Image (cartoon, rainbow, N blue to C red):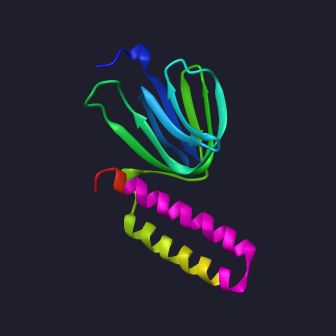
Amino acid sequence: MADPEKLFRVNVVTPNGMIYSHRGSIVDVRAVDGERSLLYNHVPLLTPLVISEVKIKRSREMDSVVDHIAISGGYIEFSNNVATIIADSAERARNINVSRAEAAKQRAEQRLKEAREKHDEQTMARAEVALRRAMNRISVYNTKGH
């Protein structure tokens, strides 16, 4: 097992409360300016995140568990060996209802099509975000190995 000194706390929080809290050795996130990997003793950081998957490797061992979480954007703050992700919504891969995500994708695609026909920029922008969120949830669910 990895040295406990090389693991740090990883928390994912939404307005509904704590979604995830474990110790990890690596956290991979997608910030607005690109991919980031955070390790033990990373320099303090506060950066916005995009709709994407967060991967948390729980130890450095070859057979370690990797947790996958779909987030709807937000922020990651890292300091004193605690990574805190604050997102409007977050869902662990194992908790994603893929049928619901597929239905949300179809609804977003339909809204997007209608908004394009009407040249409704505001509705189009909202539908594009809803579509990205649904596709991200489906992708994270599938990454888990289903």
Image coordinates of residue 71 in percent, x first then y, are 53, 50
The residue positioned 50% from the left and 64% from the top of the image is 134
Percent position of residue 95, x then y: 39, 54
In the depicted view, which residue is nearer to us: 79 or 62? 62
Q: Which residues are magenta?
A: 115-141
Please determine whether, in this image, residue 39 is positioned above or below residue 108.
above
Apparent side of residue 140 relative to residue 146 in the rendered image (left or right): right
Was residue 123 drawn as part of the magenta stretch in this picture? yes
- Quadrant that contains the C terminus: bottom left
Residue at the image point whose x is 44% and y is 40% from the top: 55
Q: Position of residue 91 (x, y in %)?
A: 47, 52
Q: Main secondary structure of the magenta part?
A: helix
Q: Eyeballing the image, is 23 above or below 49? A: above
Left or right: 145 with respect to 102?
Answer: left
Q: Is residue 73 magenta?
A: no
> Which of these two is toward me, 37 or 107?
37
Residue 125, percent across and down? 68, 68
